[in-house]
Amino acid sequence: MQATQLSQFISTAAFAADKHKDQRRKNASSTPYINHPLGVADILSQTGHDDLPTLQAALLHDTLEDTDTTLAELEITFGSQVAHIVAECSDNKTQSKQVRKQIQIDKARTVSIKAKQVKLADKLYNLRDLQTNSPPDWDIRRIKEYFIWAGKVTRQIEDASPAITELLAQVYAGTFEKD
Ligand code: NDP
Ligand code: ZN
């Protein structure tokens, strides 16, 4: 990565950290929210998806959905390519959760390859967290339901990253070891 690109990457991480500054993940240790986008970017980087727009989109992938960030703000600050990938990774929060979950399954194939890669890394991060550090108020049934739903999404897009798909297969293989 060139110096300018590194500088852009750090600025993007700082932007995401600021946007998520008051949020925590749902896991047992209530991890700072920014650990998640950073972890998603790390998965992508470790699996060879290390171009700057993909890594920036990974850092920003929950800002539209979970903070006051707007698409216009992302376009102005990071350009249309990064903003578009983030939009492709975002649910429409005006719809019910049930509808949003079905749309993720139905529309997964229609997004760009970079968005598919971010989605695969996002699901991998969440599934690993559910296996090792699950939310205290989630019973095993709810965790299993999340795995089943995530599998329906990731199966549609596995061609976008054989490397992440292999890591997902390892996680799915250990899914029910708590039984
Ligand atoms: P939620 O949508 O409430 O939570 C999952 C989302 O929360 C993830 O996609 C992730 O999104 C975010 N998240 C934050 N912290 C974590 C973490 N530590 N680990 C994983 N994800 C995290 O869950 P669901 O509604 O999908 O529940 C799972 C299943 O259980 C569903 O099939 C549902 O039908 C069922 N169920 C749901 C109940 C409910 O009240 N919703 C009650 C009982 C069962 P991101 O990465 O984008 O931040
Ligand atoms: Zn996420």
Image: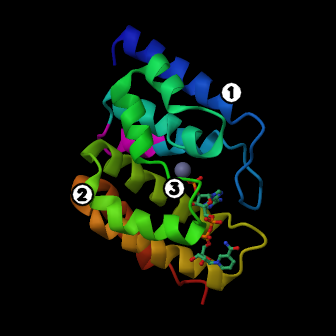
Classify 136 as above or below 63.
Answer: below
Whether pointer 3 and pointer 1 mark residues with C-beta atoms closer than 8 Å, the reply is: no
Towards the viewer: 75 or 27 = 75
Kindly state the secondary structure of the residue where label 2 is placed. helix
Q: Does the residue labelled 3 lie within 8 Å of ligand 2?
A: yes
Kindly state the secondary structure of the residue where label 3 is placed. helix
Q: In which quarter of the image is residue 33?
A: top right
Q: What stretch is highlighted in magenta?
A: 41-49
Few, some or many residues within 10 Å of mark 3 (<14, 14–19, 20+) = some
Taking the spot 46% from the left edge, 39% from the top edge, the residue there is 58
Amino acid type of the residue that numbered disc 2 sits on in the rendered structure? Pro
Q: In which quarter of the image is residue 151?
A: bottom left
Classify 123 as above or below 36.
Answer: below
Few, some or many residues within 10 Å of mark 2 (<14, 14–19, 20+) = few
Magenta highlight on residue 6? no
Magenta segment, prevailing SS (helix, strand or loop) = helix
Which mark identifies residue 18? 1
Which mark identifies residue 162? 2
Amino acid type of the residue that numbered disc 3 sits on in the rendered structure? Tyr
Where's residue 62, x and y in %? 56, 43
